[in-house]
Image (spheres, rainbow, N blue to C red):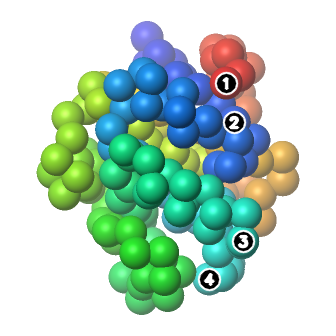
């Protein structure tokens, strides 16, 4: 059934709730991160201090980080450059090419990689299709483009039918 490809392995309310040591204990060596509504709010460029600290802790651990986003290059560079994280912009998620490129950059295989993002039909679907550990950020009321309202309603419908366990 199609819904299995849309079910995240893990859900959290915010990026900083992800336990870095728990990921490492599961054999995760590479962490792919979405940009909008994951590292920064959709229309923002500045990374909040709490998120910066979490990223620095993750980088100081054995985790290798890479941004995988559908956002344009100029937006990515403004937001992510100060963090020193490699990135794949215009990834066209859920297509697999961007995920594969990021894993190649990190030197990780799907079974030792996790993807963190806020969208089921891009981040979770692409990760699951590759066998990457998918982590969905469930924001209560994300600010985003007007056309995402319909997608969010469909995501809620999917989540009601196959609710993953909270991390």
| Residue to which mark 1 is pinned | 167
Q: Are marks 2 and 1 in contact (CB under 8 Å)?
A: yes
Quarter of the image that includes the C terminus: top right
| Residue to which mark 2 is pinned | 12
Q: Residue 165: horizontal and vertical position, in percent? A: 67, 16
As measured in the structure, the alpha-carbon distance from the residue carrying label 2 to the one carrying label 1 is 6 Å
Say whether disc 2 or disc 3 marks the residue closer to the N-terminus: 2
As measured in the structure, the alpha-carbon distance from the residue carrying label 3 to the one carrying label 1 is 23 Å
Residue 48 image label = none
Classify 40 as above or below 78. Answer: above
Say whether disc 3 or disc 1 marks the residue closer to the N-terminus: 3
Viewer-nearest residue: 151 or 164? 164
Q: Residue 93: horizontal and vertical position, in percent? A: 37, 52
Q: Residue 58: horizontal and vertical position, in percent? A: 50, 52
Between disc 1 and disc 4, the foreground one is: 1
Classify 155 as above or below 37. Answer: above
Quick one: SS at disc 4?
Answer: loop
Q: Which residue is drawn at 64% across and 63% down?
A: 53
Quick one: SS at disc 1?
Answer: loop
As measured in the structure, the alpha-carbon distance from the residue carrying label 1 to the one carrying label 4 is 28 Å
As measured in the structure, the alpha-carbon distance from the residue carrying label 3 to the one carrying label 4 is 13 Å
As measured in the structure, the alpha-carbon distance from the residue carrying label 2 to the one carrying label 3 is 19 Å
Say whether disc 2 or disc 1 marks the residue closer to the N-terminus: 2
Between disc 2 and disc 3, the foreground one is: 3
Viewer-nearest residue: 81 or 19? 19
Within 10 angstroms of label 2, few (less than 14), some, or many (20 or more) residues? some
| Residue to which mark 4 is pinned | 45
């Amino acid at each position: 059934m199609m819904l299995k490809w849309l079910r995240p392995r893990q859900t959290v309310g915010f990026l900083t709730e992800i336990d870095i040591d728990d990921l490492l204990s599961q054999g995760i060596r590479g962490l792919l991160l979405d940009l909008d509504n994951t590292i920064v709010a959709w229309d923002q460029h500045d990374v909040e201090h709490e998120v910066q600290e979490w990223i620095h802790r993750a980088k100081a651990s054995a985790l290798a980080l890479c941004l995988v986003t559908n956002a344009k290059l100029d937006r990515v560079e403004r937001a992510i450059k100060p963090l020193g994280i490699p990135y794949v912009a215009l990834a066209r998620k859920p297509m697999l090419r961007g995920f594969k490129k990021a894993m190649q950059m990190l030197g990780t295989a799907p079974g030792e990689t996790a993807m963190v993002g806020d969208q089921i039909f891009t981040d979770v679907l692409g990760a699951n299709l590759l066998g990457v550990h998918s982590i969905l950020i469930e924001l209560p009321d994300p600010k985003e483009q007007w056309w995402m309202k319909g997608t969010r309603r469909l995501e809620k419908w999917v989540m009601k039918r196959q609710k993953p366990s909270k991390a």
